[in-house]
Every structure is written in C-alpha cells, then in structure tokens.
Amino acid sequence: MTITVKMRGTCGELAQGFFRGEPILITCPIEKFSAAILSDEFAGVEGLGSKSLAMLDKVLKIFGAEDFKFGVRLISELPRGKGMASSSADIAAVAQAVALSFGKNFSPDELGKLCTQIEPTDGIFYSGVVAMNPLTGRLIKKIRAREKFQIAVFDYGGEVDTLQFNRRSDFEFPTLDDEINFEVVKKSALANQKILFKRGLEELMNFSKDLGAVAVNVAHSGTVAGIFFREDDLRVEEKISAVKKKFDFLNFMTLTRLAV
C-alpha cells in the first residue's frame, strides 16, 4: 500500500501583524507542493528534516504505534529558508499521511494545532486564502478572491531560519475584510521593512504597478516577493523580463498561481 499527501506552499504572506491583539497571518497559497509518501514497498525515512521527524514521532505517539510498518519519503518543490512555507507543508503532509495510514483524517484545525507544536505555521492545510493565528493554528476567517491571479515569485537571496526568526509584524489590521485587500497587502509589506528589510521594495511596487501588476507581497520572515498579475494578462513573461532587467539583484524563481 502507498499513501501520498500533498500540501501547498506559499509565496510569503499576503499580510501579517495583529488584529485585536491577536497575531494574524493572511496566507498566500500557491500551486507548488511538498509531498509525503508512505509505503510498505520501501523502509526507513528519506528526505525528512528535523521538524518533519519530530512530527512523525509526535503522530506515531498519538496513535500508540510502536511498530510502524511503512517507509516515509518526503519530496518538495519548495526551497528552504525563503518564506515559502516549506516546513509547514512538510510537517503537515507527514502528519496527514501517517494519520491516513491509521485510518484517520486530520481536520485542518487538528493539523493547525499539531503544526504549531513544532513551530509557528502558515495555514496551508486550509483551503484557499485564510486569516489565521500562526502561533495556535486557529482559523480566524476565510477570505475570498474575486479574481484569479498569476504570481511571479522573485528571491532576494540568502535564507532566513523561520524557527529562530521572530515571526511578527508591527502592522495592525484596522479591519479584517472578507475579500483580499491589496492595499492592506502593501501596507503590511512596507511595515515589515523595519523588521526584515528588502532592498528597493517601494521601487519594485511602483515599477510593477506601471507594468499593470495588481500588487506586490513579501515573505515577512523570508526572502521572496511576489508580483500579482491578473490571470488573463497575456504579457506576463515580457513583464517578468522587464523586472529582471530593472532589478538585476533579484532572482526570478517561478511563475505560479494563487490557489483559491
């Protein structure tokens, strides 16, 4: 028997800060994944880092498993230390895959509680864009997207250890909207500059707007930024080339979509 569970990564966050005194993160899920594979056709563990191993041990203890007959393999499209929720996707995928091997299906709320016992988490186990508490995993609100968007993901370089980095922003949400508010996305990204500075961010925002982009978001505890283009924009590749030429210190990573 083989069990495969995929979890989405993110392009940073749409916004992060506080709402009524509670830490809050608005997710930016994309069509890139980590996958946990359990099988009785191979043995041992492969590709699991320390956080994923900790989650494996935690879930096995939940089910009282002393003799686990499956091998566990983790594969990922998400680079480490970039703010693309690689760790959250890894540990959530491992947790759900192991649960399924015992005939159990963790709910998103259960995954949130489990993941935050390992580290602060992105809500990639919830469907679509959500506002959630990254320290408890609690779902605060589901957020609608009126349109579909392409996201050009750019990297500033280097890595950030999200377990050591204080995942916070000095941004205070004035309200919590039911739909994506790109003005809030901008304000949150700029507020985070005093915590994790990104070179030329305002210039990138202005240049992207001139190209017809909808918004620019950032990883509040990572190194990536995302430029949002409408799905029906047929000149995205040309516009990505313009950004690469203008901001030659940025590394273009991928063109993906906001998962709604």
Image: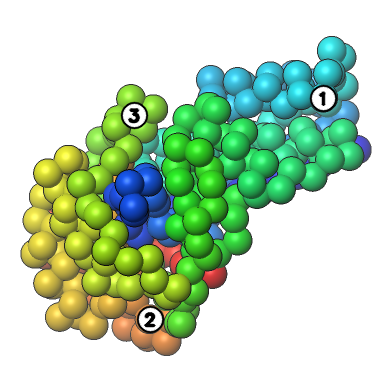
- Looking at the image, the residue that sits furthest to the front is 20
Of 66 and 90, nearer the camera is 66
What residue sits 53% from the left and 43% below the top?
Answer: 137
Is residue 75 shown to the viewer in this render? no
Count of numbered circles on the image: 3
What residue sits 29% from the left and 72% below the top?
Answer: 182
Q: Secondary structure at mark 2?
A: strand
**Sequence-wise, which precedes: disc 2 or disc 3?**
3
**Hey, what amino acid is under mark 2?**
Arg
Camera-nearest label, 1 or 3: 1
**Sequence-wise, which precedes: disc 2 or disc 1?**
1
Is residue 106 shown to the viewer in this render? yes
Cα separation between marks 2 and 1: 45 Å
Figure check: 234 above or below 248: below
What label sits on residue 161 in the rendered view?
3
Figure check: 155 above or below 157: below
Q: Are marks 1 and 3 in contact (CB under 8 Å)?
A: no
